[in-house]
Image (cartoon, grey):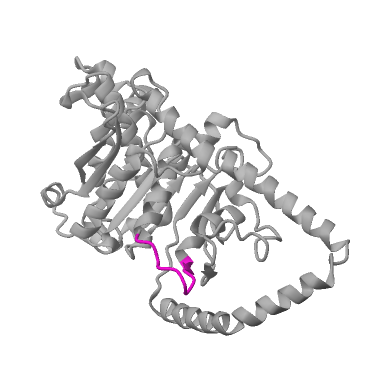
């Protein structure tokens, strides 16, 4: 009898599962099946000590919001009615509501959603104010979904990033950028957060960066962001070839004294204008530094995941001097780009790729993360343009 009694206590929701919706309740992606076990719904105690100030709690909830976007698309594909939909269970416990879905016009798929703090639901449980640290709005973007109706467009954007290391040409980029800008205007940038997983993290990084260039800084949390591309590989090859060519040239004397004389004459011609330009550039950099706010996204990576593991590579020795291709010609570095990098710590244990790249790991119990303010070569290259100024003889381009 004691054993039966303990089992009954552990299965408080058993009566609910004995309904016609039993198949839905037992779905492997149902919140009570695969969701986090170490979080609870907000209550009045949140007013005194907000769980949102805890990094583990915040990471868990934001990962749940991304999972909700995956399930919004699955609910759409499987024609689930509202009463048995899987997605709402992943935001309702945290007192949020669906405000907007982001649709890919090419295939009608849902690739993102805006979730807002649900004041009415909070008041129903006597939560009078929004917990400190909880965003008013969250833009969540899913990654690649290997299901028939949307796989083609997902893979197309995957290949876009793999080829060009940029997603700006995608329909989803413009839709996400407009949604994030609108949320920031409605609620204030300090109350808005953008999150994404895998391909969605790639979009979130580039959309957040585009908005930062406009002077609008939002909180960003990126899970397993892509770090592998052909452009990066070719750039690395080019860097190595450039270093080798420089070393080769240093082994030979200059071709003639005429070249030295021509170089001297040219330097005399541009010396005055160059000095004036340099002084003007220096003055602008001082002015920019006074009002510049640094955008520092949060990146969550797993070293066993070959898609995102390159974010942990240390800065290269050539980064400080020879790697000028990553910034537009003439730009002068003002600040050092950086990101908060959370690295999954599993000791010497090697994980399988699907586990290392999965979203579920980020709300699992006993998660061990190493945090560092990181300025790896990849992070520095992707964010460097935010902290640079144009040369004096060029007009800054509009974002």
Q: Position of residue 307 (x, y in %)?
A: 56, 38
- Which quadrant, please, contains the C terminus? bottom left
Q: Is residue 316 above or below residue 223?
A: below
Q: Is residue 9 visible?
A: no
> Which residue is at the front of the view, 283 or 62?
283
Q: Position of residue 27 (x, y in %)?
A: 33, 21
Q: Quadrant of residue 36?
A: top left
**247 to the left or right of 231:** right
- Give the residue at x 68% y 57%: 316
- Does the magenta segment cover residue 314? no
Predominant SS of the magenta segment: loop
Q: Position of residue 35 (x, y in %)?
A: 37, 35
Q: Is residue 254 above or below residue 181?
A: below
> Which residue is at the front of the view, 368 or 86?
86
- Which quadrant, please, contains the N terminus? top left
- Give the residue at x 66% y 82%: 268
Q: Is residue 133 visible?
A: yes
- Give the residue at x 44% y 48%: 222
> Which residue is at the front of the view, 307 or 371?
307
Total labels: the figure holds 0
Q: Is residue 334 above or below residue 25?
A: below
**98 to the left or right of 217:** left
Residues in magenta?
Answer: 387-398
Q: Is residue 162 above or below residue 269?
A: above
Q: Position of residue 58 (x, y in %)?
A: 37, 52
């Amino acid at each position: 009898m004691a054993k039966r009694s303990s089992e009954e206590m552990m299965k408080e929701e058993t009566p609910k599962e004995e309904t016609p919706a039993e198949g839905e309740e037992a779905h492997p992606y149902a919140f009570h099946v695969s969701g986090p076990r170490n979080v609870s719904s907000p209550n009045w105690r949140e007013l005194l000590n907000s769980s949102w100030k805890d990094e583990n709690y915040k990471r868990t909830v934001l990962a749940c919001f991304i999972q909700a976007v995956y399930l919004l698309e699955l609910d759409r594909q499987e024609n689930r009615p509202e009463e048995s939909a899987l997605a709402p269970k992943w935001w309702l416990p945290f007192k949020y509501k669906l405000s907007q879905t982001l649709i890919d016009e090419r295939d009608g798929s849902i690739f993102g959603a805006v979730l807002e703090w649900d004041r009415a639901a909070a008041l129903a449980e006597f939560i009078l104010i929004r917990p400190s640290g909880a965003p008013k709005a969250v833009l969540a973007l899913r990654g690649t979904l290997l299901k028939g109706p949307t796989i083609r467009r997902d893979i197309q954007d995957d290949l876009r990033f793999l080829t060009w290391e940029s997603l700006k040409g995608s329909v989803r980029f413009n839709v996400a950028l407009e949604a994030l800008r609108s949320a920031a205007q409605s609620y204030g940038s300090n109350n808005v957060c953008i999150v994404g997983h895998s391909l969605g993290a790639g979009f979130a990084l580039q959309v957040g960066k585009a908005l930062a260039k406009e002077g609008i800084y939002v909180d960003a949390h990126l899970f397993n962001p892509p770090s592998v591309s052909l452009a990066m590989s070719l750039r690395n090859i080019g860097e190595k070839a450039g270093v080798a060519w420089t070393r080769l040239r240093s082994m030979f004397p200059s071709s003639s004294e005429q070249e030295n004389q021509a170089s001297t004459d040219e330097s005399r011609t541009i010396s005055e204008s160059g000095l004036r330009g340099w002084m003007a550039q220096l003055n602008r950099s001082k002015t920019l530094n006074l009002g510049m706010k640094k955008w520092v996204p949060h990146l969550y990576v797993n070293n066993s995941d070959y898609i995102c593991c390159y974010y942990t590579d240390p800065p290269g020795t050539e980064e400080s001097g020879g790697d000028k291709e990553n910034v537009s010609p003439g730009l002068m570095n003002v600040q050092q780009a950086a990101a908060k990098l959370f690295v999954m710590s599993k000791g010497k244990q090697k994980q399988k790729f699907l586990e290392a790249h999965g979203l579920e790991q980020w709300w699992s119990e006993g998660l061990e993360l190493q945090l560092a303010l990181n300025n790896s070569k990849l992070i520095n290259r992707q964010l460097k343009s935010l902290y640079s100024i144009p040369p004096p003889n060029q007009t800054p381009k509009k974002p």
